[in-house]
Amino acid sequence: EWEFHLRSLSSIARDSNFAADPSSDPSLLDSVRRLCELCTREKSEDLIARIYPHLNKVFQRSVASASQNQASNCLLLLAILQFFLDHGDATLHDADPSLRTFFRTCLSREFADGVVAEATLEFLFLNKEKITKSFPTLLPQFFPLFLKLIAWNAEKLGNKFLKVFPGFFAPGSFIPLLPSTIDVP
């Protein structure tokens, strides 16, 4: 099974037809998720090393693309970011620039999309400990963006936001962020 998903990922990573928009292939997101799950389950450094270059290339292409379907592009980027966080030590990939790129390029445009907002909050909740320990300034830096996200999606995602809310506060960020939290719905 993993060979099929690896072939699919590999062909999209090198196929110039998908260079402009890798997320246009609906099977890619499923392949990325399954390969990430397999790498986590099997703990195979060989498999991780084989997958990483393709994912990195697809990530860069997805960020650079002006995708027609931004939501699918954001979901694909989140799946790749999960791989980077889970296997960054094995691949020597620092996920911080990739996370910042996602927040600046994708989430800043798609914060009002309910699917993207929910997937982002689930991603942050799942990785809250990793992100706050490894990248303590990341979430506080993007706090205004997350306030916009919750303002647009408060009714549906209020409880999920509260689960990741403590991660937005780091030493030195509480006082500057306090006035913004007063206006949170």
Image: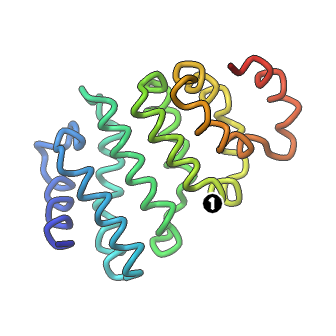
Relative to the observer, which residue lies in front, 12 or 76? 76
Q: Is 179 located above or below residue 40 in the figure?
A: above
Amino acid at pointer 1: Lys
Relative to the observer, which residue lies in front, 155 or 38? 155
Count of labels shown?
1
Relative to the observer, which residue lies in front, 144 or 65? 144
The picture quadrant where one finds residue 168 is: top right
Relative to the observer, which residue lies in front, 2 or 115? 115
Residue 29 in sight from this viewpoint: yes
Is residue 142 found left or right of 91 in the rendered image? right
Residue 45 in sight from this viewpoint: no
Instruction: Say which residue label 1 marks.
Output: 130
Q: Residue at x 22, y 51 (%)?
A: 28
For the C terminus, the quadrant is top right
Q: Residue at x 71, y 46 (%)?
A: 167
Q: What SS does tag 1 mark?
A: helix
Q: Is 23 located above or below residue 37 in the figure?
A: above
For the N terminus, the quadrant is bottom left
Residue 151 position, x and y percent, is 59, 20
Residue 130 position, x and y percent, is 63, 60
Q: Residue at x 42, y 61 (%)?
A: 83
